Amino acid sequence: MYKKIILFLKKPFNLESYISNKLNLSLLHGLFVFVFLNIFKPFKLDNLKEDLFGYTILMGVLTFLVPFLFFFILEKIKFKNWFIYSFIGLTLFFSIIYSFTLWYFSGIYKDIFSLNKLSFIVFYKYCSSLAIISIIFMLIVNDKLLRLKSEKINRIKEDEITLYSENKKENITIHINKLIYITIDGNYASFFIETGNGIKELILRNTLSNILKQTTNYPFIFRCHKSYIINSLFFNEIIGNARGYSLKSNRIENKIPVSRSLHKVDLEKLLQK
């Protein structure tokens, strides 16, 4: 039994997917807490009476900001290997920071409206109960978001698309859902396609501008750099800083550079398509 527990704790844990979904998860989490507190009024919140709505708005905003900032910090730290035991430790640490932040601002709110304040110990007990529900909620929502993204890839039509060179004399036919990225070298564009036997490269005399004109029906195909077009559905991580970002995919080893004109917020929106 002991060995089984140890083996379970040492299982890898994919934290990367939570970081890539940080905005959606944090927004939904804040909304969830706001609705939950208003409907169920746990921890004697009904005593707040007419001050309940304002209080739950504050808690909702904080339960959006705290996880979002936490995910943002984890993204910057870039720990590569996470396990179940490290996730549990992280969760305990997060619950303390989460509870203290909510307790502190809850106290400020209650001072303004002359309401009774709770000690941190009592507040932490309440908050820990809510944190367990919140963590379960995040696990379920993240799993759902990953499924939706996977289904989105699978729903892409298997119809082949034929791309023509500028002079219309040459062409290649590909499955758009198998295209990972395109890069240009001189007058030739290289198409990197996922196949059952690995990544295959196809070459066509063309320009990236002309290729984009022929793929306007596919919003997930976009140009991220003067020399690169990507299929955003294959990319799940943004690395780097304001001086220069790159995109990573678990299908390829190399990183795809990003033009400085594209801000991180814009990239995140594009990767969510």
Image: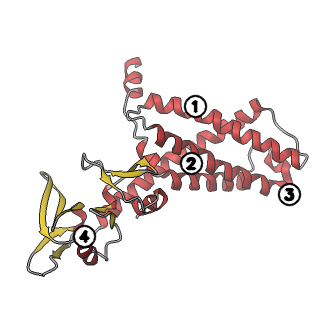
Position of residue 58 measured from the top left corner of the image (x, y, whole percent): 73, 52
Callout 4 secondary element? helix
Q: How many marks?
A: 4
Q: Which residue is mark 2?
A: 68
Position of residue 186 measured from the top left corner of the image (x, y, whole percent): 17, 64
Q: Quadrant of the N terminus?
A: top left
Can you tell which mark lies on residue 208?
Answer: 4
Callout 1 secondary element? helix
Can you tell which mark lies on residue 50?
Answer: 3
Q: Quadrant of the C terminus?
A: bottom left
Can you tell which mark lies on residue 92?
Answer: 1
Callout 2 secondary element? helix
Residue closest to the far bottom: 168
User: Do labels 2 and 3 touch, CB within 8 Å?
Assistant: no
What is the crowding at mark 3: few (fewer than 14 residues within 10 Å), some, or many (at least 20)?
few
Tell me which residue sits at (12%, 62%) in the image. 202
User: Do labels 1 and 2 touch, CB within 8 Å?
Assistant: no
Q: Earlier in the sequence, mark 4 or mark 2?
A: 2
Tell me which residue sits at (56%, 51%) in the image. 26
Say if 105 sits above or below 191 in the image: above
Say if 240 sits above or below 212 in the image: above
